[in-house]
Every structure is written in C-alpha cells, then in structure tokens.
Image (cartoon, rainbow, N blue to C red):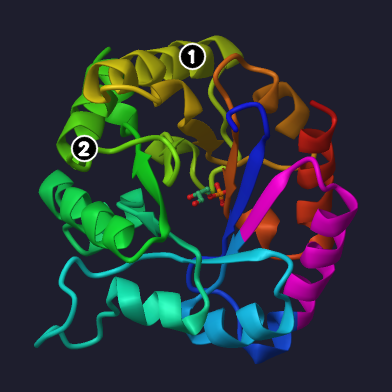
Amino acid sequence: MANRKFIVGNWKMNGLRSALGDIGGIAKIAEQNSGVDVAICPPATLIASAAAEFPDVAIGAQDCHQASSGAHTGCLSSDMIKEAGASLSILGHSERRADQHETDADVKAKAEAVRSAGLGAIICVGETEEERDAGSAVSVVCGQLSGSFPEGADGDWLTIAYEPVWAIGTGRVPEASDVEEMHAAIRSKLGELMADGSENVRILYGGSMNGGNAAELLAVPNVDGGLVGGASLSAEKFGPIIEAAAAF
Ligand SMILES: O=C[C@H](O)COP(=O)(O)O
C-alpha cells in the first residue's frame, strides 16, 4: 500500500454547492490516474452531496468529535460523518490545534473514534517557524506524533501528514533535505509506536504544494503523498498534482 501515492485535498472553509462541479472534475482526473489514491475533504456541508454524486472518489471530513454522541453543540461524530458518506477524516490540523485549542490527547481520542467507525484517519503534525528556528522541529513533531497516536494502531487505516505550520498557505516550502529528514524521523517513530505494519502507514507532506513543486516533493524518500489546501480547490490546479503523483 505504501507504494501508492495518496493525494488529499483539504478544502478547509471553502466551497458552497456551486463548487460540487470542481469535485466532479477532480474525480474525473482521479479516475484517469488510477495508480494514485485521491481524496477530497470538503466542508462538512458538502460531504453527503459529494459522496452521492461522485462515488468513485473518496470523500473525507476535516474533523470529527471523539464522543459518539452527546451535548457537543456544533460537532459531528464519526458515525455522523460516515453516514454522510465520508470514508476518512483529517484530524489535528494545525489550524484546529491553534483555533480550537486541540491537544495531542484530543487528536488521539478522535483517531480512536474514527477507527471505531471503520474510517481512515489522517493525523496532522508540524512545527512552527519558531520551533524550526530553535532547532527543535524534529523533537516537536515526534512528540506530537507520540501524543496523538491511537492505541494499538495497525497500518491499514492510518495516514500521517507532516505540515510545517510556516509553509501552510504561504508559498514557502522547506528544502527537500529538511522534508527528507522529517519524514525519516516520522517513519522511525512509527516503527517505535507500532508493533508491526509501520511501513504501510503513508506519510504525506503538506504546505504550499502545487503543480509546480509536487514532483520534487513527492520524490523525497518517505513522502508518500500530499495534503493540499489552496491548490486543491479546482480541478485545474489539483489535476497536475495528481498527475505528478501518477508518475511514481
Ligand atoms: O491541509 C492542507 C494544508 O494546510 C496545506 O495548505 P496549503 O496547500 O494551502 O498550503
């Protein structure tokens, strides 16, 4: 499984019903590049219609509450996103860690809830610019990974996304050597955290990936795909990334 690239679009808080056509366009490109796994994570309001209209592309959520039900106004459970048609959820994105104060413990609980529902999880980790400048990027990211890691995980449903916070939406991308160092550290940490199957966990890079830099980033050892924000919002921009992944 780890030899198939995985390209995931995170639409964040973008997209009304009028954007469903873009998902259709992306689904078509995904179908033409069947050697790549592709998923789109639109806002929760579009999950059901996207999943119904485009059953051949994986649709994911951007978050999920750790509880199965209860007094959590505005939140969605893993069963709810599954019923809507999601097959996976992004968890612990740095924007949620910052804006909603999500902790590693929250992300771990969310991942366990997602697994219980039979969904895939993409757990996000990444350092701030200050942490990188201080030389602590690898220890920060490995610490986040350990703290966010679900109990007893095997490799089949789990993906890790390394997203340096300072590269998200900025047009700045780390040196390939820095990406290589971090992905190797994550791979090694996964080996410590998992009894077996760690080699099957895909590690995505995220942060200003686009059609112009995707091939170089995807060629870095242990980069098994991409988690793409701004460049996933249209088939025109996302297509070249999927096509770059298909070349591996
Ligand atoms: O989840 C996606 C990432 O935050 C990357 O966003 P970006 O591609 O707009 O930099």
Task: Please give the name of the residue rendered at 33% of the width and 77% of the height, measured from the top-left corner.
Answer: 79
**Is 32 a magenta residue?**
yes
Q: Does 43 sit left or right of 148 as displayed?
A: right
The answer to whether residue 223 is visible is yes
Name the amino acid type tagged 1.
Asp
**Magenta stretch bounds:** 21-39
Find disc 1 in the rendering and name its residue.
178
- SS for callout 2: loop
Who is closer to the viewer here, 157 or 214?
Answer: 157
Residue occupied by mark 2: 152
| Residue 33, image x, y percentages | 85, 47
> Would residue 108 appear left or right of 91 to someone viewing this image?
left
At 77% across and 28% down in the image, what residue appears? 215
Q: Which of marks 1 and 2 is in front?
A: 2
Residue 52 shown in magenta: no
User: Residue 181: x, y in percent?
Assistant: 45, 11
Dominant SS in magenta: helix
Q: Residue at x 58, y 25 (%)?
A: 223
Q: Indicate the position of residue 126 as horizontal and vertical percent values.
A: 35, 34
Left-right relation of 160 to 108: right
* Above or below, comparing residue 147 to residue 133 in the picture: below
Nearest to the observer: residue 95 or residue 201? 201
Secondary structure of residue under mark 1? helix
Quadrant occupied by the C terminus: top right
How many residues crowd mark 2 within 10 Å: few (<14), some (14–19), many (20+)?
A: few
